[in-house]
Every structure is written in structure tokens, then in C-alpha cells.
Image (tube, rainbow, N blue to C red):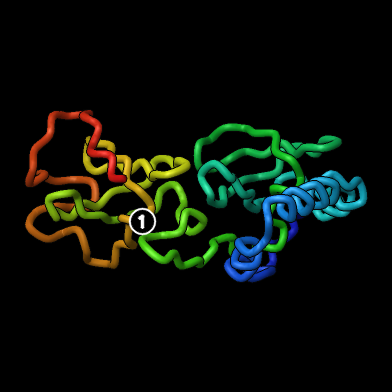
Amino acid sequence: MMNKSNPPAKQSMDYAQLLEALNQASTFDLFRLNSMINRELDSSERIDRIKAALTIGQKLSYFDSNSNSLHDCEVLQLNQKRVLVLDFSDGKRWKVPYYMLNLEGADARIHHEAEEGLSRHAISVGDVLGFKDKHGREHFGHVLRLNTQTVTLKVEEVQWRVGYMFLYRVLEGQGDQEGELLIEGERADQHDEGIQGTLLE
């Protein structure tokens, strides 16, 4: 049987607008919604509908909450509550819940503006971001990890933990001034390799 083709990418709902509504909710409201959503995610009817739409060898993506990003994958096996996929980003096989599959090709990015810096919901592992250190020098790096209060960035061989409020998007062409590149090149303030950068608070 031939693989089913994926529909064109679309955003099924306005996640940023939904997030704004959730920010107005009480903690109890969020708990109540969470319990309802969990029941829907575990619904056998929903799982059966998803399984019926899948074929072995189908290529699609799933959402990884740790990296806050979509991972391209291939369906290898359909099990009762989880699907075995080959993750193209790391070459490993993972069993993921069916609800993590992005069947409709939705745009999973949340274009949410923070009052200062960048919203935690709008950043994914692998993004290239910039920030200024306490001396006003600009640095550019790739996101390695999303923490509760900070983002871990790799700037050349140095890792920095930077508060969300200090981060900004890197525009095309930025980061190549005065010999400082996104990842490669010499740093103006030379650090020993592997030293942890300053934690901005």
C-alpha cells in the first residue's frame, strides 16, 4: 500500500490567542481543563481515528514538549496506545502516544509576544537567539535546553544560561559583525573552553 500523503501545513487553532485566554484563568481552572483534556487524549475513540489514518512507512511529525518543537519521523509500528516511530533528527526509534502525532501538518509554533524578551512558549531547541551580557556585548547562539526561568544557549564552546526577558530573535545577517559568528569564530572576550557563561537574572 502506498504511503498516504500529508496535507499542506496549517495551524488548526490560534495557540497564541488560546494562551492569552489561559493566562486569565485561575489555577483551579487550569487544573479542571487539564483533567478534561487528559480524558480526551486517552479516549479510545480518538485513538482509533488516529490509527485508522496511519499507514506503516508514513512520514509525518510529532511534537516534543521538551524541545518545544516538531520532529520529522516515519511510522514503523502501530500498537494499542503508542506508535513506534523513527525520529529523523536523532536516528532513534521512539514509542510515542498517538496524540503527539501532527496528522494535519499544523503549524505548532506559538507566536506569542512577551512584554520583555521572548515568551517561553515561542522558543524551541535549535533556535538561534541573541542577548547582551552585563557589559553590553552582543552574543548569538543556539538553544540547547529550555529551563524554567532561563534558556541554555551554546555560544561557540561556551554555554550560557540567559533569562527569557533578555533574549531576542536573530535577524538574517546578524552575528557576523566584528568577526563574531553564530557558532564559529573568535570571541572578543576569550573564555576557556567549556566554561559556563554568566547567568542573567
Residue of label 1: 165
* Residue 112 percent across, percent down from the top left: 50, 66
> Residue at 56% of width from left, 48% of height from top?
71
> Residue at 88% of width from left, 47% of height from top?
43
Between 108 and 38, the residue placed more toward the observer is 38
Q: Say how many tags the image has.
A: 1
> Residue at 11% of width from left, 60% of height from top?
177
Q: Secondary structure at mark 1?
A: helix
Between 158 and 102, the residue placed more toward the observer is 158
Q: What amino acid is at disc 1? A: Met
Task: Describe residue 52's horizontal placement relative to residue 119 as left or right.
Answer: right
* Residue 187 percent across, percent down from the top left: 11, 44
> Residue at 21% of width from left, 29% of height from top?
195
Mark 1 Cα shell of 10 Å, populated few (<14), some (14-19), many (≥20): some
Between 119 and 49, the residue placed more toward the observer is 119
Task: Describe residue 197's horizontal placement relative to residue 126 as left or right.
Answer: left
* Residue 120 percent across, percent down from the top left: 47, 53
